[in-house]
């Protein structure tokens, strides 16, 4: 316990050493804060509305749903961001040391309850609303008659497999995997159902037809990502993970790998070609024809 | 509040080695942790500059790489080493083991940590872990390329999957396992000390929020590191004993069919993130305590809503164990569980928001002194808000579908976990330096350092959010390989330049830190007119903190500007009858 003498000595020392004047009373830090935060807010808003670096247009119905949810979240968090940062700047300006006495207050139950409830409601509502788009992607199956395509990741490329005209995929025998003889997936040569399976390094899909991608991996974890689909799915060895959607815009899009898979991760890259249904049927036929002549 | 155990040595050990190297003194050990973190952060920052150089000037010659060129595997080695050093040896180590070791015993009126020998052992284990990690850069095949998350099977199947995945990866796992050991011992020590060694009158609700931060962090660390240790042992077994915990059947890696079966790659992710998400709170909770402490001191006001601060810290600590699945929305985990993890993640944002509101409440009506420590504390609030709000996007699985593993995530976690925690460390350094070294750091340099860093980190990490919107994947060693990345080059250039600017500004800090140790203005016992017990002991703190005269605590930790008192602060250890009246 501190003695009385010690306390007196402490207090006189303290009086002799007034807190640094350079930091007291100055409005400079407040103005600096306000400027930095102002520039931050302005540039953030500018870049968002200018759309220079932004999402490419979505090409699926669920993609638009996700964009909508993004916009909602963006507006809510944007308002909070601006309010919170400007409040901070205001506090720093308004309550800079001007020789006044600080306002003694320990807190406020009303405020604590209010801001806890409000944040809880806002945050959880956003989460509940977002659940809808998530459900569209992952709950429930694809429409009957959807086109199934198997997507296989391997260091460092994507392979896509389509069923034969009978709609069936042939058996895979891991021991038969050998890219150098043109069998990168290990299709069993003795399985007639695999005979007309199309295997390509590019993904071709028909427009306006339900699609199911069966995503898998041969070695390590990869991740299938097409920006315009707004869908990303890890390809996990040992699992086959379905993802379903319907594309509504013809065009060519890029597929990237988004999970670190080794030194060639950055060039694990492929193209998605969305064709008209007629073009797709023709492409499919041509592939089958060339397979049956082999 | 027990009697102080007699095991604590009261006389300073004789001899330089006993005193400064193999010391049992919590202050020396704390300083050792801080210096270890300073070395790690120096290497980590230099590595991040290598990344930024390589991305925008891929043909630039960099010393230390084969032919001066950073190859794709070198880039991933740098990524992995940067992440591992920063997360484990800086963010986990400095705010908790560094500042916590130094100030927790003093702030609770204790002579030392409860178990000084275990304390020393924790430090040496941590140092060994770091040396093992760094040594992995010099073994055949080089350091690991699997990232700080070491996802299996990439990290489990050995060098067949790529360079650095042989001995380098094994050393990485051993290093992290050792680190877990050190952290577990340290956590037990912090918990025991806080519960048992508080001085007379120091009830739980009178603890400084720093102590609350360290205590809750230690509880979280005790539960989290045990799981990571188990995961590391399983991974080591997969690698060395050919078990199959994380490796499924029929893997064909580099054209070779592996003889493993029955393992699950997702098991690693569950174990890793069960540790990994609490880990981000291990990094930030001590910082939250420090920021509350500093904001209160320099606003000359009690912390607004002290109890709400304590409850929100505890709530974060508890909830941190329920949200790990938000790292796995696209992993192939059952999609229904994503909804639970999503809502829980949004809920854990609430106590964080409560803290932010209370920090603003602490500033409100205050008399704000702009010291360097205070500037970093205010800067912390700013980056914490920014980084926290981007988390609201990532917490929604539907949005994470797009943003997962893009630069958006990099921007988010660097602001909320990296920069915020670093700002807390800077605030702590400027605030406690006078107590630690008996001299002040130069305030003007400190302020210049703050403004450069504050502007710099926003210039680095805000644009990363735009890269994320454009779908730029993280951990790509080239920004040329995908067509849609080409228009993003200006953003990458801007980030690289900002990174160089910000890193250079840190030289001011190094200079200030080391110069002030010898030449700074001599410090008073209580230069900031603060209230907690670390300001009741002499400056610098003697070997035996309280020289056997343990203080009695009469009041809460943040009695500033109390009406009726002569001074605008009332230290915790002054008897009510001795408080001067106005």
Image (tube, rainbow, N blue to C red):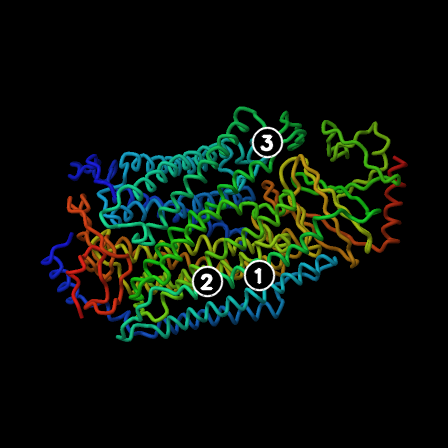
Badge 3 density bin: few <14, some 14–19, many ≥20, Cα 10 Å: some
The residue at which mark 2 appears reads as A113
SS of the residue under disc 1: helix
- Residue B582 placement (x, y as % from top left): 18, 70
Q: Nearer the viewer, mark 3 or mark 2?
A: 2
Q: Mark 1–mark 2 contact, CB under 8 Å?
A: no
Q: Real-space Cα distance between discs 3 and 2?
A: 57 Å
Residue B228: mark: none
Residue B68 in view of the camera: no
Considering only vertical position in the picture, is B15 above or below B516? Answer: above
Residue B414 in view of the camera: yes
Q: Nearer the viewer, mark 1 or mark 2?
A: 2
Badge 2 density bin: few <14, some 14–19, many ≥20, Cα 10 Å: few
Considering only vertical position in the picture, is B158 above or below B335? Answer: above
Q: Earlier in the sequence, mark 3 or mark 1?
A: 3
Q: Nearest the camera: B561 or B228?
A: B561
Considering only vertical position in the picture, is A37 above or below A251? Answer: below
Considering only vertical position in the picture, is A263 above or below B311? Answer: above
In the picture, the quarter occupied by the N terminus of chain B is top left
Residue B160: mark: 3
The residue at which mark 1 appears reads as B466
User: Would you say A190 lies left or right of A132 here?
Assistant: right
**Which of the chains bears the disc numbered 2?**
A
SS of the residue under disc 3: helix
Q: Residue furthest left?
A: A5
Q: Real-space Cα distance between discs 3 and 1?
A: 36 Å
Question: In the rendered image, which quarter is residue B27 located in?
Answer: top left
Q: Are marks 3 and 2 on the same chain?
A: no
**Which of the chains bears the disc numbered 3?**
B
Q: Which residue lies at the image location 58% right of the left edge and 50% below the top edge?
A: B405
SS of the residue under disc 2: helix
């Amino acid at each position: 316990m501190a003695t009385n003498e010690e306390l007196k000595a402490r207090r006189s020392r303290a009086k002799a050493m007034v807190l640094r004047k350079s930091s007291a009373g100055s409005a400079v830090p407040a103005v600096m804060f306000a400027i930095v935060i102002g520039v931050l807010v302005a540039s953030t808003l500018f870049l968002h509305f200018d759309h220079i670096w932004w999402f490419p247009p979505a090409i699926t119905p669920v993609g638009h749903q996700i964009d909508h949810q993004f916009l909602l979240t963006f507006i809510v968090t944007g308002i909070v961001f601006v309010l919170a940062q400007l409040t901070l700047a205001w506090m720093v300006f308004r309550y800079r040391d001007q020789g006044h006495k600080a306002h003694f207050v320990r807190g406020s139950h009303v405020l604590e309850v209010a801001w806890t409830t409000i944040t809880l409601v806002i945050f959880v509502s956003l989460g509940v609303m977002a659940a809808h788009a998530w459900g569209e992607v992952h709950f429930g199956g694809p429409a009957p008659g959807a086109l199934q395509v198997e997507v296989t990741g391997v260091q460092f490329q994507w392979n896509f497999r389509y069923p034969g005209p009978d709609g069936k995929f042939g058996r895979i025998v891991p021991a038969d995997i050998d890219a150098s003889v043109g069998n990168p997936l290990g299709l069993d040569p003795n399985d007639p159902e695999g005979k007309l399976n199309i295997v390509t390094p590019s993904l071709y899909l028909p427009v306006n037809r339900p699609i199911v991608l069966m995503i898998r991996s041969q070695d390590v974890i990869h991740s299938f990502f097409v920006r315009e689909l707004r869908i990303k799915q890890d390809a996990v060895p040992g699992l086959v993970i379905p993802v379903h959607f319907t594309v509504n815009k013809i065009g060519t899009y890029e597929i990237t790998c988004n999970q670190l898979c080794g030194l060639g991760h950055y060039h694990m890259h492929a193209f998605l070609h969305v064709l008209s249904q007629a073009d797709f049927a023709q492409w499919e036929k041509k592939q089958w024809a060339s397979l049956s002549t082999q | 509040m027990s009697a102080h155990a007699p095991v604590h040595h009261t006389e300073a050990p004789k001899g330089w080695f006993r005193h400064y190297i193999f010391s049992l003194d919590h202050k020396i050990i704390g300083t050792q942790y801080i210096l270890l973190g300073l070395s790690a952060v120096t290497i980590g920052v230099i590595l991040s500059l290598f990344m930024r150089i390589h991305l925008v000037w891929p043909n630039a010659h960099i010393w230390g790489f084969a032919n001066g060129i950073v190859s794709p595997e070198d880039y991933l080695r740098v990524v992995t080493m940067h992440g591992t050093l920063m997360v484990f040896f800086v963010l986990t180590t400095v705010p908790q083991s560094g500042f916590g070791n130094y100030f927790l015993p003093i702030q609770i009126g204790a002579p030392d940590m409860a178990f000084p020998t275990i304390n020393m052992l924790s430090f040496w284990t941590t140092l060994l872990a770091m040396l093992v990690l760094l040594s992995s850069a010099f073994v055949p095949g080089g350091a690991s390329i699997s990232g700080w998350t070491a996802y299996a099977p990439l990290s489990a199947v050995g060098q067949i999957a790529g360079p650095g995945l042989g001995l380098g990866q094994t050393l990485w796992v051993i290093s992290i396992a050792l680190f877990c050991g050190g952290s577990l011992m340290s956590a037990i020590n912090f918990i025991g000390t806080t519960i048992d060694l508080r001085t007379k009158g120091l009830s739980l609700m009178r603890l400084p929020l720093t102590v609350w931060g360290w205590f809750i962090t230690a509880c979280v660390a005790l539960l989290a590191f045990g799981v990571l240790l188990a995961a590391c042992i399983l991974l080591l077994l997969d690698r060395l004993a050919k078990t199959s915990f994380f490796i499924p059947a029929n893997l064909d890696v580099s054209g070779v069919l592996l003889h493993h079966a029955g393992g699950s790659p997702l098991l690693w992710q569950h174990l890793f993130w069960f540790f990994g998400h609490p880990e981000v709170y291990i990094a930030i909770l001590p910082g939250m305590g420090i920021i509350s402490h500093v904001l209160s001191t320099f606003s000359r006001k009690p912390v607004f809503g002290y109890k709400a601060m304590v409850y929100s810290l505890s709530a974060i600590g508890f909830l941190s164990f329920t949200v790990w699945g938000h790292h796995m929305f696209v992993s192939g985990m059952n999609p229904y569980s994503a909804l639970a993890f999503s809502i829980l993640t949004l809920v854990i944002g609430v106590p964080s928001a409560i803290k932010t509101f209370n920090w603003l409440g602490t500033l409100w009506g205050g008399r704000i002194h702009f010291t360097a420590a205070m500037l970093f504390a205010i800067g912390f609030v700013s980056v914490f808000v920014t980084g926290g709000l981007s988390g609201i996007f990532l917490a929604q699985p539907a949005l994470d579908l797009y943003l997962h593993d893009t630069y958006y995530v990099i921007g988010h976690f660097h602001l909320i976990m990296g920069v915020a925690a670093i700002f807390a460390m800077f605030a702590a350094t400027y605030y406690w330096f006078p107590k630690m070294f008996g001299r002040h750091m130069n305030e003007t340099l400190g302020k210049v350092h703050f403004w450069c860093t504050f502007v710099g980190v926003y210039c680095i990490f805000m644009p990363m959010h735009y890269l994320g919107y454009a779908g730029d994947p993280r951990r790509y060693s080239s920004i040329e390989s995908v067509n849609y990345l080409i228009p993003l080059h200006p953003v990458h250039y801007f980030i690289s330049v900002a990174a160089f600017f910000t890193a250079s500004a840190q030289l001011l800090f190094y200079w200030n830190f080391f110069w002030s140790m010898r030449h700074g203005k001599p410090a008073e016992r209580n230069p900031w007119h603060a209230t907690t017990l670390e300001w009741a002991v002499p400056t610098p703190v003697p070997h035996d903190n309280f020289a056997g005269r343990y203080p009695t605590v009469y009041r809460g930790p943040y009695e500033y500007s109390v009406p009726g008192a002569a001074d605008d602060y009332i230290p915790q250890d002054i008897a009510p009858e001795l408080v001067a009246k106005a």
